[in-house]
Image (tube, helix red, strand yellow):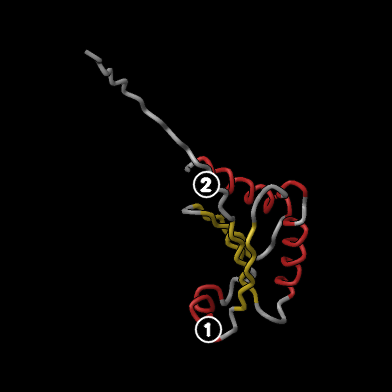
Amino acid sequence: MLAIKTIPRSIHIQARFKSTVSLKFFTKKRCMLCTNANEVLKQAISSPEVDEVDLEFTKIDIMDPKNERWFEKYCYDVPVLHIEKDQTVKKHMHYFDKSDLISDIQEVSAKAESNQ
C-alpha cells in the first residue's frame, strides 16, 4: 500500500512596494518668503541625497478659490511644506533649510518603508 506523507509548509512572501513621498507646497503670489522657500525646495529635491526617493510634488496656491480650506488654515503661515508618505507627515513653515528638508524627506521615506 502506498502511504502519502503530508509535510506542513509555510511560505512567507514579502513584497516591497516603493511608494511615493508626497511634497505639498502651500504658497501664494507676491510672497517673497514663498519665492525663497521654493528655491531652497528645488535645491533639496534635486540633490543626490534624495535621488533614490520617489517624489511627487504639488504646488497649492492658497488664494485659488478651490483651495479655500488651505487658505483658512495657512493664510498667515505660507510658505508651508507637507512631506507625507502613508501616515507619516513632516511640516516646514516660513523659512526652509535645504539640509533639514533633505533629512526629513529621507526620514519620512525610510520610516514608511520600515512600516511595510
From the viewer's side, name the closer residue of 51 and 88: 51
Residue in view at x 55 percent, y 57 percent: 84
- Residue 55 x, y percent position in the rendering: 64, 57
- Look at mark 1 in the image and give the residue it sits on: 66
Secondary structure of residue under mark 1? helix
Measure how far apart labels 2 and 1 are at the Cα level.
30 Å
Residue in view at x 51 percent, y 40 percent: 114
Q: Earlier in the sequence, mark 2 or mark 1?
A: 1
Residue in view at x 24 percent, y 15 percent: 3
- Residue 105 x, y percent position in the rendering: 63, 51
Residue 109's disc is: none
| Amino acid type assigned to the residue bearing label 2 in the image | Ala
- Look at mark 2 in the image and give the residue it sits on: 112
Q: Is residue 36 left or right of residue 9?
A: right
Secondary structure of residue under mark 2? helix
Residue 64: quarter of image: bottom right
Residue farthest to the front? Answer: 1
Residue 31: quarter of image: bottom right
Residue 33 position (above or below residue 53): below
- Residue 40 x, y percent position in the rendering: 75, 61
Quarter of the N terminus within the rendering: top left
From the viewer's side, name the closer residue of 53 and 47: 53
Other-residue count near label 1 (Cα within 10 Å), few / some / many at <14 / 14–19 / ≥20: few
Is the residue under label 1 in contact with that under label 2 (CB below 8 Å)?
A: no
Residue 81: quarter of image: bottom right
